[in-house]
Image (cartoon, coloured by chain):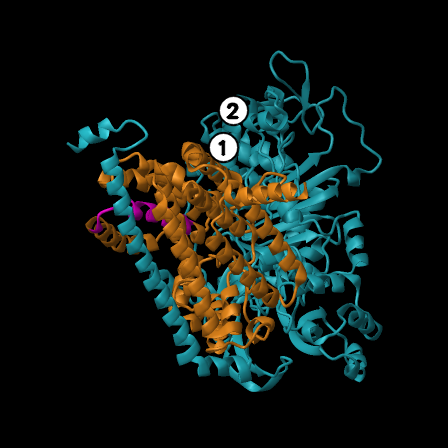
Amino acid sequence: MRMRRSRVREGRYKPLKEARHEEALFRRRALAGFLIIVACLVALGVRFSFLQIERHDEFSARSEANRVLTRPLAPARGLIYDRNGVLLAENVAAFRLEITPEQVHDLPATIVRLGEVVPISDDDVERFNALRKSKRSYEGTPIRLKLSEEEIAKFSVNRWAFPGVDVVPYLTRSYPLGEEFAHTVGYVGRIDEADLGKLDKGDYAGTTHVGKTGIERYYEDRLHGEVGYEKIEVNADHRPIGEPLGRVAPKPGENLYLSIDARLQEATEAAFEGRAGAAVAIDPRTGEVLAMVSVPSFDPNLFVNGIASVDYAALLDAEDKPLLNRLLRGNYAPGSTMKPFVGLGGLELGLRRPEDTVLSTGEFFIPGQSRAYRDDVRGGQGRVDLVQAIAKSVNTYFYSLALDMGIDRFSGFMSRFGFGQPTGIDLMGEGSGVLPSREWKRGRFNQAWYPGETVIAGIGQGYWVVTPLQLANAVSTLAARGVPHTPHLLRAVQRGVDARIEPLPPAPPRKNVIERAANWASVQQGMQEVVRSGTARGIDAGFPYPIAGKTGTAERYSRTGTEWTSISASPIERHQVLFEAFTPADDARIAVIVALEAGRSGAHDAAPIARKILDAWLPGDQQRQAERVAGGGEGAASP
Amino acid sequence: MIDELFHEWRHRLMSMWRKPRLDLPLLGALLLLMGIGLATLYSASDLDRSQVISQALRFMLGLLLMTVIARVPPLTLRNWTPWLYAASVVLLVIVVIHGEGRGANRWLDLRIIRFQPSELLKLTMPMMIAWYLNGRPLPPGWITLGAAGALIAVPAALIAKQPDLGTALLIVASGAFGIFLSGLAWWRIGALLAAFAGIVPVAWHFLHDYQKNRVLTLLDPEADPLGNGWHIIQSKIAVGSGGLWGKGWHHGTQSRLEFLPEHTTDFIFSVFAEEWGLVGVLLLLALYVFIIARCLWIAAEAKDTYARLLAGAISMSLFVYVMVNGGMITGMLPVVGVPLPLVSYGGTSAVSLLAGFGVLMSIHAHRKVLAN
């Protein structure tokens, strides 16, 4: 019946009777609704009278006499140590000048007058004004940090002329080892407007600095700690009276222990003798970074309290770019350092057996094409197998192998070692290099892939670009017989001054990227021959462990022309040179890569630096080995 | 001659009063409320004239919009309703896809004006519910209720996703009041409330952390004296210290010394309570009750279900603003960003509220036309 009724009423107007009914219904509902509203508002009124009559005295007291302010207390930032407890970042006591805007009548004039007593730059004023917006007007806002003793004395004499301006002690960040860790530990800087948008206003209420780069930025959450607060009684001018009424202490940030060995880091930096480049040393068993340097570097302490524009301009304009983090964003053509990987690919993909040989005549041709791809030795190096091809760095072997592999299988295999992607290290801003592939070229140039490009990819040339960290990660994976570990810097944390140092749990094991162990052995043998009899022979002289290595000398001009490129006037500047190594060769405990932006050859310039790094690493390793043997009885018994 | 001219002008003036037929008691109450709002704002902004002037300009704009809407017959509004509703939902979707705004995506930038499409729904939502129920047999059954629920839920979910919990709440309320006024059986209301009580624990999981924090802070404000708790503690101190008679205009210390955050917008009621005391609060609440009562009266006089439901829903929504805001500043309800109608500083809410009153004026003016 209801159905029929609603079908009748297709039109706009309802039958009169129904309309009357709905009107009456509405009136009853409106009345009910109104009564509910009145009841709720009466309840609200009761709530108001409860606060304003019943609890009036209490709130009146809190509002009137007390004026209790809650003042944030900044936590102490966590310290950063190397693996042996050498301090890399610490907090030192300093003094700053603070202005409480509410107590100052004419702020701009006061700042000008203050500038006559203590130097205040335009940058300082700008930062002060930006910071002031996020604070209440009775809160002190810093205008000058790191006052010298002389400045404190000068201000103290004139103190009476500046009501609302105070000298306040605080802790500031300091990097005792300076340049050596600028590209890894990074630095903190004053919180700027961009940071204010990202940070929690409550958590950072008392904090002036925040991690800007490196470990300081990546582990900001761990390092910062938790804000505390104290309740203080103030008078009508918001001047504190007496002792704090209540206090919740801030919780200091975690102390971080890095995997880096500061001594090794120092030796690594020294080995470069100022030549531009980068080096990384990794423990292949864990992925822990033992040393990583980018040369030249800069003093991170300059940035902590705002770098002077003169200093900053000098760093920006310097020809060898000290601000560039070559480790993460440096781009190097990997050159012949890729040959062990390409050779391994040939074995793993079933395209070559270790004993298969190729005849090097000095020139290689793609069938049907006239363009010549050259060997390093005029006239060629004769018939070579894989071990000899790696040891003598014979281009022809890898030209033909890459061509047989084809670019798709080639880049597919290389990506197993992490080329063309960030390694995932615990630092921000890592580049991904370029692993050439059909898709990459299509996306980058919108062009088809040519076989000639596959040929030169076989010797690490062409579009192929790696970051030093990527190369180190790949070599470390190779050294670990194909077991990849994400490179990382953080090794252990300490929550609180007296707390135990807690090692971080190891990352879950990842799949081995090498399918047959015998394939690895052939490549490793070739890399040992590099050092024994090949391109870098003699580099292991006097070293107690067998070293596996490979040189790389990336041409700035590729030798694909019909004529040999004439030796240019300055052979030192002609090449980007590289060296990769790991040792002990069959059970590696360190993998090292060295990249130099200019040099004669990998063997001549990069390999000696790598040897110096290994020499610096050796005493510590021998000591650890001795300790293990001494305490080894139990260690060997337990599984 | 002069006499004739005088008569003609008199006639014209009279017809202008009659033609838009602004309801004088309602208009008077609104003007009084706006006056209180401006006076409180002047004190809360620490005698900042520019804020008061810009707010007054927004009131002017709102009043103009109100007079214009009052001239549109409810029948026309009814015919436009589905389109207006659809348009506002589409705008809302656009904002969700690429809106701008700090933290929350609420704003749509039309180059000339920037506005929050969610404000539109404060009007188009009750319109749509009224339009839909107007064509259905009343009181509504489960099917009608389900369809109406979907009409409410879609835009409300979009707004809650922005995330703007306060506005979503107001819009859900305006739709729900429409259904309530259409005569939904009490036992069905009871069943819905019971179901709602069952859903709350589930919904808790879907709240943003900051929304959870607001609820948790309400239960124990002292636990977070630097963050969310600060608002509630300081607001309660302001209200409580006002006492029976208040500290007097511009004598409130809590807001002047900047203990109280957001003291010109969401927490302006605290300033009012501090300076005018319980007496002032009760008078202000009485003014709101008068406005709501007058609006419901207008609704009851309307002769068509659409106009009745629309007018009724708008009137009752006004109560939600007052209740949520008042509950918030006294620490009775969570901190949800809902302004005190026509008192809090802020343009969009004042204009959309006055537009709503324009609809009521129109319904009032055209009540006789609909009578036959």
Q: Is residue A211 left or right of residue A16?
A: right
Secondary structure state at the residue bearing disc 2: helix
**Residue hosting label 2:** A405
Q: Are marks 1 and 2 in contact (CB under 8 Å)?
A: yes
Image quadrant holding the C terminus of chain B, namely top left
Say which amino acid is labelled 1. Answer: Phe
Please report the residue visible at 51 percent of the width from the left and 26 percent of the height from the top.
A408
Q: Is residue A431 visible?
A: no
Give the percent coordinates (x, y) of residue A198: 57, 55
Identify the residue at the far bottom of this view. Answer: A242
Give the drawing colour for chain B. orange
Mark 1 to mark 2 CA distance (whole Å) = 10 Å
Q: Which residue lies at the image location 53% right of the left edge and 65% below the top edge?
A: A202
Does the magenta stretch mainly form a helix, a strand or a loop?
A: helix
Numbered disc total: 2
- Find the residue positioned furthest to the top: A368
Residue A332 location, quadrant? top right
Give the chain letter at badge 1.
A
Q: Nearer the viewer, residue A570 or A354?
A: A570
Label 1 crowd (10 A; few <14 / some 14-19 / many >=20): many
Letter of the chain in cyan: A
Question: Where A294 sits versus A392, above or below?
Answer: below
Where in the figure is residue B336, as x and y percent of width and height? 44, 58
The crowding category of the residue bearing disc 2, from other C-alpha atoms within 10 Å (few below 14, some 14 to 19, many at least 20), is: many
Which segment did they paint magenta?
B168-186
Depth check, front residue: B294 or A491: B294
Is B131 within the magenta? no
User: On the image, numbered disc 1 is attached to which residue?
Assistant: A413
Q: Is residue A7 left or right of residue A559?
A: left
